[in-house]
Amino acid sequence: MGRYVIRRLLQMIPVFIGTTLLIFVMVYAIGDPVNAMFGDRAPDPATAAQLREEFDLDKPLWLQYVLYMGKIFTGDFGTAFNGQPVIELMANAFPITVRLAVIAIIFEILIGITLGVLTGLRRGRPIDTSVLVLTLVVISVPTFVTGTLGQYLIGVKWGWIAPAVSPAATVDELLFPGLVLALVSLAYVTRLTRTSIAENGRADYVRTAVAKGLPRRRVTVRHLLRNSLIPVVTFLGTDLGNLMAGALVTERIFNIQGVGFQLFQGIVRQNSPTVVGFVTILVIVFIVANLVVDLLYAVLDPRIRYA
Amino acid sequence: MRGATRVTWSVGAVGALALVAAGCGGGGGTGGGGGSGSGVVRAFWTDPQNPIEPANTNEVQGGKVLDMTFRGLKKYNPKTAEAENAVAESVDSDDQQNFTVKLKKGWKFSDGSAVTAHSFVDAWNYGALVTNKQVNSYFFEYIEGYEDVHPESGAPKAKTMSGLEVKDNRTFTVKLNQKFSLWPETLGYAAYSPLPKSFFSDHDGWLEKPVGNGPYKVDSYTRGQSMQLSKNDEYAGNDKPKNDGVELRVYTDQNTGYTDLQAGNLDVVDELPAGQLKNAKKDLDGRYINQPAGIFQTVSFPEYDDAWKGKDKLKVRQGLSMAIDREKVSSQIYHGTREPATDYTSPVLKKDGGYSTSLCGEICTFQPKKAKKLIAEGGGLPGGTVTITSNVDTGSHRQWMEAVCNSINSALDKDNACRVNPVPTFSEFRKDISAKKMDGLFRTGWQMDYPLIQNFLQPLFYTDASSNDSGYSNEKVDKLMDEGNKASGEKEAISKFQDAEKEILKDLPAIPLWYQNGNAGYSDRVSDVRLNPFSVPVFTEIKVK
C-alpha cells in the first residue's frame, strides 16, 4: 500500500513538468500580451519594450519557461499584469471554488445516489421512468441556461436570493450556485448508480444475502450499495477536478470570483503566470483526486488489494 | 408491508428535495444586500487592467476611479465637453509654445498635503519616464525633453523633461517641442493629474490605497473585489458630491451586473451586455442612458498597397463607402447604440468643437446604384473581391463586418464581392497591422484621449503618426494641421483642422462607419445619472433617494 502510494506520487513529477510546459507554450502561442495592454490602439514601442523586459517576454521561450519554473520552486508564481501576485489570487480564489465544488459534490452524493438507488430498485416503475426523463432533460440543457433562468426566477422575479454572490462567498450564498453546478453531474450519478444497482441486484451475493434472511435495508446498504458504488466513486473523484476547473460558467453567472473566473481573465488578458499557475494547481488536484479514488476501491471492494 | 416501505422512500426523497430548495431560498436571502450606508451609490466595476495610476490607466474601469479621486489643471464639463479650469487659475501663452501655469489656492490632497507646482511637474516627469512603464506616457510627447526621458530604444538620457520648470509653489512653466495652440484643452485628461509626495516615497502603499485631490477619497480597496469611496472633505472644487459615497463592486460578467441591477442590488451599471440592449429601455422603465461617446469606427485601406493607389481606385473606395447601409447596421445590430458617421470626429465635440453632420456628405450616404457605377468606373475591385479584416474576440465585430459585407454584396449584385476575414485575437490583428500586411479593408477605430478635433485627426492621418495604420500621407493635410496647431485662437485652430479633414475626405484613406454611444442603466434608488464624454458615470451628481 505504502509503496503503491509513493509510486503514484512520483508519477506526479513528469506529469507536472509536462503540463506546465504545455500550458506555457500554448499561452505563449496566443500572441503578445503587451499589445493588449494598450487597448484599441498601437502600443508605444519604447514602453512596450520596457514591459516585455519586465515580464521576461523579450527572452526566448525556453528561457522564459526555465525562469518561470525556477521562481515556482521558490514559491513565487509571478505577478498578474494588474500588479497583484498570482499567489494572492490563488489564496482568494481556491478556497471559494473548493467550497463551491464541495457543496456541488454533496448535492451529487445526497440527491444523485438517493435517486439512483430508488430507481435502480424500482426498475420500470413510474418513479424510475419519470426520474430518467428528468435526468435526460437536465443533461441536455446547458448549465448557462439553467443558471441564468434560475437566477432570474428566484433572484429577480421572486427575490428569494441575491442574484450575485458577494466577494466573501459564504456557504449559504453558494448553495444555489452549487446546485446549478451539480445538476448535470447529478444526473449522471443518478444514472450510473441506477444501472449499477440494477446489475448487481441479480448478483449471487445479493441473492445469498437475501436468502440468509437479512433485512432488506441491510442487504441494500451493506451489500448491494457498497459494491455498486465503485463506478460512481470513480466518477465523483474525477468530477471533483472537473467541478473546480469547469465552474467557469457557473462562476461567471453568479459573480463568484473563483478559479474559473481567474483562469478566464488570465486567458483573456494573456497573462501566462496566472494561467500556468492555476492550471498547475488544478493538475495536482486531479492527480490527488484520482489517487484517492483508486485507494477507495480497496475500501469498497474487498477483492481489490494494493501490494 | 412492502407497499408501506415504498411510500416512505419516495416521501423521503421528495422531502429531501423540498428541504434543499428551502435551504437555498432562506440562505441566500440574508446573504446579499451588502453593508453599504443609505446614501452610498453602488456601482458596477470590473477589475482594472493595470494598477490604478493616473498615467497608467487607459480604460474606463480604472478611469472611473481616477475621475472620482483626481482633479487636474482642467476638467471637462460633463455636459458640453469643454475644458474648464479646475486646479489651474490660468494657463497662458503668447506664442502657443511656452505656457505659464498658475494654480489656485487652497487645493489639498485627501491626506492633507497641499497641491503645489511640484505635484504636477513630478507627476508628469514620472509618467513620461520610460522605465516607469506607464501606458499613457505618450501624452507628454509634446513637452520639450520628452525624447530624453522616453527614447525609442535604449536607456533614458535624463530623468526629468527640460521643458518643465517650477517657478514658485503655485507657478510652473511648460515649453513644448512644437507650437500647439489647443494644448491647454488637453489638460483635463487623467494622465495630467497631480500626485502627492506619498506616491513617490511609498509607491506600493499608495497603489494599495490611492490618494488624490478629487471629490472622493478611497476608504478601502480590495483588489479584484471592491472599492469603497467617501466624500473628500479637503476637496476644493465646486462639483462636490451630492451623495455620501460610492461603492464599486467587481463583477465577473456584465450579465450578472445587469441581473443585480434588475433585482435592485446595484444602482449604476455602465456596461450593459450587448444581448440586453434591445430590451434595456423597457426592462429598466426608461432608466437607460444612450448618449454619444468619443469613440469612432472606420475601416481603412492599406495605402501602402499598390492595388489601392491611384485616381481610379479612389472611385472604388468612394463606391465602397456608398455601398454601406450605415443606418440599417446601426439600428439592427446595435439597436441604436451607434450613430451613422458623417465625418471623422465625434458628436461629443459638438458643433463648436469641430463636429460636422455634413462634411462627408454624399460619400457617407447609402446609394447602391451610384456605388456600383463608381466601382465599375474605377476598374472594379482589385482582384474582384475585397476583404474586411478585424479581430473578433471583443465587441460584435464579426456581426457588423458580415452586415457591411452583405450590404456591399447586394449593392454590387455579386455574392462574393466582399468577404469577412476574422482574426482570433486583437494582439494578432495588431501584429499584422504593424507589419503592414493588410491587403484589403481593415477595422480601425479611435477612442479619444481628450475631446478635441486635433485628437481625432492628427494621431490617425498625420504622416507617420502613432496610429496612422493605413500609412496615409498628404503634405497638404500635414501643413493644415501644423497651421491649426500654430493658430492663436481656438476658433481658427478648429477651422484649420476642419480644412484638413476635408482634404482627408477627398482622399478617403478610411471609410467612416459610425460613432459609438455610451450606455448605462440605473436603479430607481438613484437619480441624475449621466455619462461624461469619456462614458464614465458622473458620480458627483448622482443623488440617492
Image (cartoon, coloured by chain):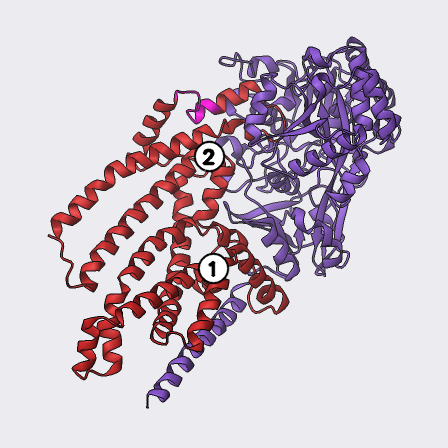
Q: In this view, does B264 lie to the left or right of A229?
A: right
Q: Where is residue B487 in the image (x, y as percent from the top left)?
A: 83, 16
Q: Local crowd at mark 2 within 10 Å, few (<14), some, or many (≥20)?
A: many
Which badge, 2 or 1, is on the more N-terminal residue?
A: 1
Chain A is which colour?
A: red
Q: Judge from the rendering whether residue B456 lies leftward or rightward of residue B111; answer left or right.
A: right
Secondary structure mostly taken by the magenta-highlighted segment of the chain: loop
User: Can the viewer see residue B78?
Assistant: no
**Which residue is more in the foreground, B505 or B123?**
B505
**Vertical position of residue B490 compared to residue A130: above or below:** above
Mark 1 Cα within 10 Å, few/some/many (few <14, many 20+)?
some
The magenta segment: A52-60
- What residue do we see at 37% from left, 25% from top? A64
Identify the amino acid type marked 1.
Answer: Ile
**Foreground: A288 or B178?**
A288
Residue A265 x, y percent position in the rendering? 50, 41
* Chain B shade: purple
- Same chain assignment for discs 2 and 1: yes
Q: Can residue B406 be seen in this view?
A: yes
> In the image, B390: left or right of B184?
left
Q: Is mark 2 on a helix, strand or loop?
A: loop
Q: Where is residue A70 in the image (x, y as percent from the top left)?
A: 30, 30
Q: Residue A139 carries which label?
A: 1
Q: Which residue lies furthest to the top in this view?
A: B475
Q: Which mark is residue A271?
A: 2
| Closer to the camera in the image, A7 or B243 | A7
Q: What amino acid type is highlighted by mark number 2?
A: Asn
SS at badge 1: helix
Q: Are discs 2 and 1 less than 8 Å apart at CB?
A: no
